[in-house]
Amino acid sequence: MTSLSAQERSILAVLETTQAITVAEIATALEITIHPMTVDRHCRALQRAGYVNRRPGGAYTLTCSGASVRQAAAD
C-alpha cells in the first residue's frame, strides 16, 4: 500500500491512541458519518499492508510499520 486515504490515516490515528479497538469503536471514535462496513474494509486493507493486526474477537491494533506510516503521514 503506497498511498493511504484520508479515512485510512484517520483509522491509524485512532489506533495509535488505543491498545486494541473494534471496528464499531473505531467508527464511533472517528465521529464522522462513516459506516462500520467501510471502516472494516479499510481495516482489512491496512491489515494486508501490514499496518494493523486483527486480534481474536475482531479488535485491531497498530503494528510498528503502521506507527511509522502514521508518523510519516503526520509530518
Image (cartoon, rainbow, N blue to C red):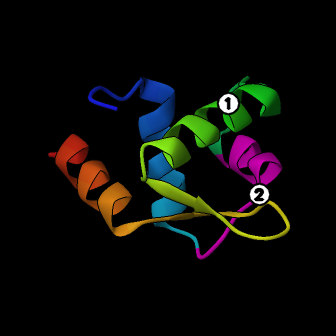
Residue 22 vs 32, above or below: the answer is below
Taking the spot 36% from the left edge, 29% from the top edge, the residue there is: 4
Q: Which residue is mark 1?
A: 41
Which dot marks residue 69? Answer: none
Measuring from the top left, give residue 13's x and y in whole percent: 45, 51
Q: Position of residue 61 (x, y in %)?
A: 57, 66
Which mark, residue 22? 2
Bounds of the magenta segment: 19-29
Vertically, is 9 above or below 63? above
Type of the residue with mark 2: Thr
Eyeballing the image, is 23 above or below 64?
above
Please identify the residue farthest to the bottom as the structure is shown: 19
Looking at the image, tell me whether mark 2 or mark 1 is earlier in sequence order. 2
Q: Residue 62: x, y in percent?
A: 48, 63
Quarter of the image for residue 35 reads: top right
Looking at the picture, how far across and down is residue 50, in whole percent?
43, 52
Q: Secondary structure at mark 2?
A: loop
State how far apart marks 2 and 1 are (Cα): 13 Å
Q: Residues within 10 Å of mark 1 (few under 14, many from 20)?
A: few
Instruction: Please check the rendered image and state whether residue 27 is part of the magenta-colored stretch, yes or no.
Output: yes
In this view, the mark in front (2 or 1):
1
Magenta part, dominant SS: helix
Q: Is residue 69 above or below residue 53?
A: above
In the displayed structure image, the side of residue 33 where residue 19 appears, left or right: left
Q: Is residue 22 magenta?
A: yes
Residue type beneath disc 1: Arg
Q: Residue at x 42, y 26 (%)?
A: 6
Q: Secondary structure at mark 1?
A: helix
